[in-house]
Image: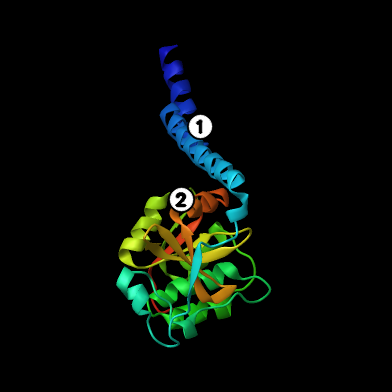
Amino acid sequence: MKSLLIVIAVAVGIVIAATGCESPRDIAKRKAKEAAVKLLRERAKKLLREQPAKQLQPAFVTPACTPGGHCPHCQLYGLADVPQNRRHHNYGGGSCVFAGIANVMEVFGRSDAADYLTHRYSGGEYAGGLNAKLDELGWDYVTITNGDERVLDWCDRTGRGAGVTFKANHFCSFLGWENGYAVILDSNHTDVYEFYPREEFLARWRSYGGWATAIVATPLPNL
């Protein structure tokens, strides 16, 4: 009888492992994380409801940088910089994700990689689909969909920028923080940089899912 119980216990353990069941501790950790993300998004939506008039209006904009050159303003504040003549416009009836990531690649001076991406892909995209394409091309990246602002702080410190969900059904390029403002390059309006108060930006970003993708390195693909 004892040996039978042992066999049953082992069999149950194998079934649990095979079905990928979570332990009670893992379930508790996952639920706590999900609750924290849900709370962040609820707070973001509440803030937006309280300030509806500000939803689509940047606090101010700055003129585009000198064509072909790097912006002294960006260098002064340590922002990621995209020369005006290398800013990628939205294309193909709505390819803002690829245009936004291409603009982030331009920060590294990797026009070759940016052009390769925009010539190869077009149309709407989501986080998992973009990850798969970056994996296919062999580029190192960081992607989050939980609205963790520490990733944006890291992007700001390292001057690399990130593609972010911002505005309704839209993806833009986050270029850094400046004096409490998020600096945004929108592929629909590449002649200016847009500035949004940090807390308002974070609230809106999280309300749209909190997706950010930052490029760590962009090796040259086999063209």
Which label sits in the foreground, 2 or 1? 2
Task: Determine the residue positioned at 55% across, 77% down.
Answer: 118
In the image, farthest residue toward the right: 93
The answer to which image quadrant residue 167 occupies is bottom right
* Circle 2: element type: helix
Q: Residue placed farthest to the top in the image?
A: 1
Question: What residue is shown with label 2?
Answer: 199
Q: Position of residue 204 (x, y in %)?
A: 54, 52
Q: Position of residue 7 (x, y in %)?
A: 45, 22
The residue located at (60%, 73%) in the rendering is 188
Classify 52 as above or below 9: below
Q: Is residue 186 left or right of residue 70?
A: right
User: Circle 1 is placed at which residue position?
Assistant: 15
Can you tell which quarter of the image residue 5 is in?
A: top left
Q: Residues within 10 Å of mark 2 (few under 14, many from 20)?
A: some
Closer to the camera in the image, 15 or 54:
54
SS for dot 1: helix
Question: How far apart are labels 2 and 1 at the CA level?
Answer: 47 Å
Q: How many other residues sit within 10 Å of disc 1, few (<14), some (14-19) or many (≥20)?
A: few
Can residue 222 be seen here? The reply is no
Q: Amino acid at mark 2?
A: Glu
Which disc is residue 88 wearing?
Answer: none
Task: Name the quarter where the N terminus is drawn.
Answer: top left
Quick check: 145 above or below 186? above
Q: Position of residue 65 (x, y in %)?
A: 44, 81
Residue displayed at 50% across by 79% down: 87
Q: Is residue 11 left or right of residue 160?
A: right
Q: Nearer the viewer, residue 165 or 194?
A: 194
